[in-house]
Amino acid sequence: MIKRIYYFALFFLLIFPLLLPAQTSPEKFLGHKVGADRKLADYNQIQAYFQTLAKESGKIKVLTIGKTTLNKPMIMAVITSEENMANLDTYRSINKKLRDARDLTPDDASRLAKEGKVTVFITCNLHATEIGSSQMALEFAYKLVTGKTPFTADKVLKDVIILVAPTINPDGQQMVTDW
């Protein structure tokens, strides 16, 4: 009986990691490494990859922030811990209050600064031919979400809300990749 329990526990420990959902890497999604010679992810692929990552992880949320000149959806990813993700409205409210602190007392401003989270906004690919940053955005998001970084990503995501616009010129990015 003890032997059966031991084998069951061993089986469970070996199989359990395989049952956990894994995040799709950019390489697996695209079929090539990001930055590979003569291979560029176009805007549709970038957008689809971010949506895939958001379905697979509670640490990333994709928002449509507007439309491009050619009427494509412009996206931004919010990357942070799952706990912060559940409280985004609270942190947004704190940021709005701190943005114009003229109506706050110094004590209120200090308290809100301690309660809030650092927010970093990263924009990629402003000019159409600055293509590298839009490609990097895929790896950047993946590594933050999976923790496959040279630093402790979970610690960073506990304290920081990262906003990533993988390209702020989707139409130009698409034109370059189509060329």
Image (tube, rainbow, N blue to C red):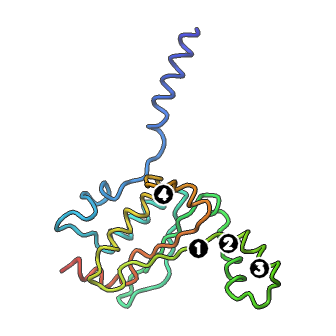
In space, the residues marked 3 and 4 are separated at their CA atoms by 31 Å
| Above or below, 3 relative to 30 | above
Nearest-to-viewer mark from 2 and 1: 1
Question: To which residue does mark 3 refer?
Answer: 109
Which of marks 4 and 1 precedes in the sequence? 1
Label 1 SS: strand
The residue tagged 1 is: 119
Where disc 3 sits, the SS reads helix
Q: Earlier in the sequence, mark 2 or mark 3?
A: 2
First in sequence: mark 3 vs mark 1: 3
Q: Residue at x 17, y 65 (%)?
A: 37
- The image quadrant of residue 132 is bottom left
Q: Is residue 179 left or right of residue 54?
A: left
Secondary structure found at label 2: helix
The image shows residue 81 at horizontal and vertical percentages of 59, 59
Q: Quadrant of the N terminus?
A: top right
Instruction: Please state which of residues 39 and 73 is positioned toward the viewer in this rendering.
Output: 39
Q: Marks 2 and 1, how far apart in space?
A: 9 Å
- Please name the residue that numbered disc 4 is placed on: 145
Q: CA distance from mark 1 to mark 4?
A: 16 Å
Q: Pointer 4: residues within 10 angstroms few (<14), some, or many (20+)?
A: many
Residue at which label 2 appears: 91
Residue 59 spot, x, y in % from top left: 54, 59
Q: Nearer the viewer, residue 26 or 99?
A: 99
Q: Amino acid at mark 3?
A: Ala
Q: Residue at x 65, y 69 (%)?
A: 117
**Gap in angstroms between the C-alphas marked 3 and 1:** 16 Å
- Which comes before the other along the chain, label 2 or label 4? 2
Counting residues from the N terminus, which is met first, the one under dot 2 or under dot 1?
Answer: 2
Please state if 89 lies on the left or on the right of 60 as rendered. Answer: right
